[in-house]
């Protein structure tokens, strides 16, 4: 489960037609798939209403490659150094090999 976490739900017919919401979580509970939304819709979705669920993306290169098989179009920066690199200062003593700061 979790395929639709961070995705989008769109209501295509019924009382909530044209409403949409961001999906907070997608999980299974007692054998039933549950989709939690960040905010409730302004209309109730009834059994039989047609909805469109769009898969969620956490914007990591691993998800882009594994879930969507689309690493070629990934436009993030997965290899930026960590926070410790941003606060590094030159040192005249100790081991200066480019490794992690302690």
Image: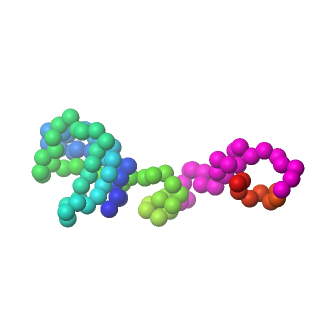
Residue at (47, 64) in percent of width and height:
66
Residue found at x 16% / y 44%: 45
Q: In which quarter of the image is residue 32?
A: bottom left
- Measuring 20% from the left and 34% from the top, which residue is drawn there? 42
Looking at the rendering, in which quadrant would you find the C terminus?
bottom right
Q: In this view, does 66 lie above or below 57?
A: below
Q: Is 27 situated above or below 91? A: below
Which residue is at the far top?
Answer: 42
Which one is in front, 47 or 26?
A: 26
**Whether residue 1 can be seen here:** yes
Task: Name the quadrant of the N terminus.
Answer: bottom left
Residue 83 in magenta? yes
> Which quadrant holds residue 30?
bottom left
Question: Can you give x and y, in whole percent of width and height, for residue 31 in the image?
Answer: 20, 65
In the image shown, does 84 or 14 lie closer to the viewer? 84
What is the span of residues highlighted in magenta in the rendered image? 70-94
The spot of residue 78 in percent (x, y) is 60, 54
Q: Which colour scheme is used?
A: rainbow
């Amino acid at each position: 489960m979790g395929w639709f976490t961070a995705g989008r739900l769109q209501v295509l017919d019924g009382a909530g037609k044209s409403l949409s919401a961001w999906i907070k979580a997608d999980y299974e509970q007692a054998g039933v798939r549950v989709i939690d939304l960040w905010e409730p819709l302004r209309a109730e979705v009834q059994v039989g209403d047609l909805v469109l669920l769009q898969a969620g993306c956490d914007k990591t290169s691993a998800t882009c490659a594994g879930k969507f098989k689309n690493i070629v179009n990934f436009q993030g920066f997965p290899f930026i150094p960590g926070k410790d690199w941003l606060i590094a200062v030159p040192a005249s003593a100790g081991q200066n090999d480019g490794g992690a700061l302690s």
